[in-house]
Amino acid sequence: MRTFLPHSKSRLFGWGVLLIAVVFMTAGTPLFSQNYNRNNSSRNNSSNRSGSRGGSYSGGNYGSGGYGDYEDYGAREYYRWGYRSAVGGFSIDADRVVRTAPTEASQKMAERVRSLLAEIPADLDAPTPLRKISLRRLSAEVRSCLANDRPIPDSILFLGGLTGIDYVAAVPEEHDIYIAGPAEGWTVSETGEIVGKESGKPIFRLEDLLTILRSWNTETPEVITCSIDPTPEGIAAVADLGALATDAEREEAIGLMDVTFTGIPADSRVAAVLAAADYSLKTISLGYETVPIKNFPSYFESIKASGTANYGQRFWISPVYNKIYHGTDSLTWKLSDMGVETLTEREHFAADGSRRAGGKKDVQAARWAANMSKRYDEVAAAVPVFAEAKNCMELALCAAVIYAKHLPEKSGLSLADLTDEAVFPASPLPAPAKVPGFSLSRQIGGKAAVSVTGGISINPWEAVQNGTALDAELDAVSLAFAGEKWYAD
């Protein structure tokens, strides 16, 4: 029987992992993009400093890696994974340090990806409320591609254009597991994401599903988390500067920070997406980035100068999994719509570099977190990486149902061709190891304002084990389909 980590251990960022995560891009493989406004006046003042956000953007040399043909990265065809085309505005240099990259290069790379996408099969191009995918047949298609030295088609890489997962079902008579949900044809957005033609939502990825299935193919699956930690020495150095230090001085004092993940490989696309969302939550809350939607002020805009920098306000995001329903035989499972909540808590930084939670509640922080939770989908439509993160959360729920409810055993389907890397090897990405010392706080009137910390945690196991209910109407739901294709509407 599979177990899940206690909640107290699942919060890796626990009492104060810093939310100075970054949207990054590997030197050979751009990963995602930001489709929102950058506050250049607040971020670019220090962009040319040594060790800062990537050095000069002139001459095509973006940091120590030197990415002169940046726009072609990620647009190349990969033997197993096709286009790593969720484009980004950031890169990782040869030392695995995250750096920024020019918007113009990201756009050129998106154009290149668009030119390489294969024509969509006609029966996958039209939107449908319910597209069914056979994991057995999909696995056979993948196996055939590998055996015959053929690239895996876009249609498989993009899971038939799925934009959601409503059902997961074991089908013993077919020795199969089906997943099903709304789907549509796909295209490349202006900033490089693979999105639905109709909805503009990010398309689900086979790569991401397999990352989670493989990571949780164990008796004790680990909660998925992302965090970026400043060193104790860096925190102590910032404390020594005092409250009147500039943002640039704090950034230099904090130094490089460590990027860590649990529950997934650090060199996976899922890890990249979560790091991007982690970074975006901080920059948006501190007002370094603005979301182009009405009446959505940053946390920074809502607070007054505190006159001290020895505490921070934590914001972190986590999925809200609603009730999961099953039929009488527990073979068919219906996944309810899920939400994403933003939580908040105060954190204190000590001069010795230690951190602890607690203290007086910040009313403005609670209001900002509630607004972010309420408008998460609206924000995600403007900042695509939040929609990508929600996709990962939904895939995590799907994988948890498959394993916790023993669907491979009930269906008689082995997932080995998909989960065994000896059969279907993964194509790892260069994992980011360090992040430059982005400022711990912002200033108002020469005084240090409250800094912001946080993280991301994905834990569907409690919902899958304790949040289920019988729905006899699911007994009448049939996801079976005829023919030899791995999908059907």
Image: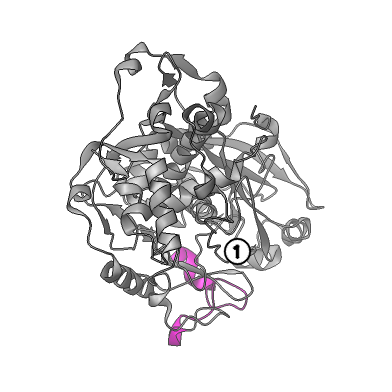
Query: Which residue is tagged 1?
Result: 432
Identify the element where label 1 is drawn.
Answer: loop
x and y, in percent, of residue 235 in the image: 73, 56
Q: Nearer the viewer, residue 70 or 427?
A: 427
How is the structure coloured here? one colour
Q: Nearer the viewer, residue 31 or 181?
A: 181
Question: Looking at the rendering, in which quadrant would you find the N terminus?
Answer: top right
Residue at the location (60% across, 63% down)?
A: 432
Q: Is residue 56 magenta?
A: yes
Residue at the location (38% across, 65% down)?
A: 151
Q: Is residue 54 magenta?
A: yes
Residue at the location (39% across, 76% down)?
A: 72
x and y, in percent, of residue 332 in the image: 40, 24
Direction from residue 222 to residue 456 in the image, left or right: left
Find residue 421 and report its image quarter: bottom right
In the displayed orientation, state which residue is furthest to the right: 352
The image shows residue 390, relative to residue 80, as above or below, that is: above
Give the amino acid at mark 1.
Pro
In the displayed orientation, state which residue is furthest to the bottom: 59
The image shows residue 66, relative to residue 271, as above or below, that is: below
Question: Looking at the rendering, in which quadrant would you find the C terminus?
Answer: top left
Query: Would you call the spot at circle 1 few (<14 residues within 10 Å), some (14-19), or many (20 or more)?
Result: many
Is residue 341 visible in this depiction of the protein?
A: no
The image shows residue 424, relative to residue 176, as above or below, that is: below
Is residue 346 visible in this depiction of the protein?
A: yes
Q: Nearer the viewer, residue 304 or 234?
A: 234
x and y, in percent, of residue 322 in the image: 44, 24
x and y, in percent, of residue 392 in the image: 46, 44
The region drawn magenta spans: 41-60
Q: Nearer the viewer, residue 26 or 455?
A: 26
